[in-house]
Amino acid sequence: MTTLFFAIGPVFEALSPSIAVMAFGRLLSGVGAGASVVIVPIYIAEIAPPADKGFFGAFTQIMCNVGIFIAQLLGYFLSHGSYWRTILAIGGAIGIAQAAGLFLSVESPKYVAEQGNLSLAKKTLRRIRGGHVNVEDEVSSWGSADSGNINGTTHLKSKAKSLAHHTTDEEQTLLHNVDGVRGARPRPGKDQNLSIMQVFRHPDYQKAAVAVIMVMVAQQFSGINSIVMYGVSLLAGLLESNSALLNLAVSALNIVVTAGCAPLADKLGRKTCLLGSLAGMGTSSLLLAFGITKSVPILSAVAVLLFVSSFAVGLGPVPFILASELVGPDAVDATQSIALGANWTATFMVAQFFPLASAKLHGQVYLIFAALSALFAAFIAWCVPETQGKQNADEVWGRERRVD
């Protein structure tokens, strides 16, 4: 559904006879972008191998970076005359290609199981994992939060696994709610899914909502989009004609480093990557402030590249992973919306006010970003739990499982 917005929005943009039509096209594209960035991390979390969720979760940010790089590359060569219309039309073509590709993809097997069709869920999971892989343990883990509730024991877990090995898929589908043994947790209906306000009021999810908001705001208030959006104008006075090429290099580096560091979230932990990222960005901000105010082009260029590399280590990919790991399935949709709402709000603020602050403070504006990086690092160190290797939100926050 989101690809419809991706495909239709650029039609109005590329053919726009007026600003009003252009704005309408941008609105349609924005609806598609906002919805997809909420849905994609959830989908990835549900189809990724359990041990590699951090690695595959990083691809949300990797592909966002690829899109930015394509847009900047097209802009570098086509930003003259009426060729800007071609740039926008290419965005629509990418949307159509995505729609075609999605017809070849599968529904989330976890989602299918939650709808009660365990047989189809296993078939889909085998298609993703490969026919030679035993998927029984992974399927059992979908319902482990529920099957291990009673009396704090693992008896029902073992019972569910035993049934999984001695009954057919169809029998499991029919029996998965019998005697309290579940092959998968039934997906909450509309009345059971928590709204955004309910998440904020829920005693188990309040801290998670605050943590998600702060991490997402940190992603933007650390200053990354001051480089991505305004790198050319920011560095034009120092690097003259080379500033546009540096901006392309920044985007390319962002892709390479984010992809190269994708396994780190699973190896080092989400929290470690976030703190290392903020430390690097804060240091880079100090160097960039010095380089701009003292007119040292080489230092400024190196600081920008270090800034982007540090962002790619953790603060780029990890926030999109955290939102689906800090809460239970009844709050994932709302929490992901909260996360992206905070992210886009912070993006808007940086986009609107950075040029004003830069004009007033020149390079010293990066001292503000350095201070903010330090504050966010302190918050994450004290208030954001590690989610690596945790089976569910209760384990993340150290809570006892509740029996509903």
Image: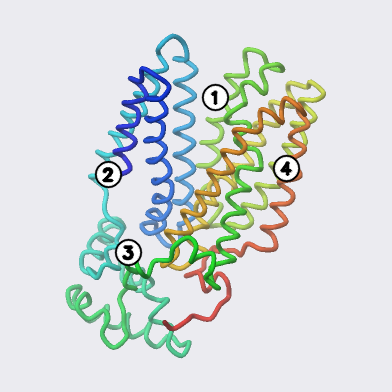
Name which of mark 1 and mark 4 comes first in the sequence.
1
The quadrant of the image that shows the C terminus is bottom left
Answer whether labels 4 and 3 touch (C-beta < 8 Å): no
Name which of mark 1 and mark 3 comes first in the sequence.
3
Between the C-alphas of marks 4 and 3, the distance is: 39 Å
Between the C-alphas of marks 2 and 3, the distance is: 18 Å
Residue in view at x 73 percent, y 56 percent: 378
Residue in view at x 50 percent, y 17 percent: 76
The three-letter amino acid code for the residue at tag 3 is: Lys
The three-letter amino acid code for the residue at tag 2 is: Leu
Up/down of 163 relative to 33, above or below? below
Helix, strand or loop under label 1 = helix
Up/down of 60 relative to 308, above or below? below
Residue holding disc 2: 102
Res 356 quadrant in image: top right
Q: Pinpoint residue 263: horizontal percent, then vertical percent.
A: 52, 51
The three-letter amino acid code for the residue at tag 1 is: Leu
Name which of mark 2 and mark 3 comes first in the sequence.
2
Please, which residue is most extreme toward the right here? 294
- Front residue of 372 and 49: 372
Residue 55, disc: none
Helix, strand or loop under label 3 = helix
Disc 4 residue crowd, few under 14, some 14–19, many 20+, Cα 10 Å: many
Residue holding disc 3: 110
Up/down of 371 relative to 293, above or below? below
Disc 2 residue crowd, few under 14, some 14–19, many 20+, Cα 10 Å: few
Up/down of 13 relative to 350, above or below? above
Disc 1 residue crowd, few under 14, some 14–19, many 20+, Cα 10 Å: many
Residue holding disc 4: 282
The quadrant of the image that shows the N terminus is top left
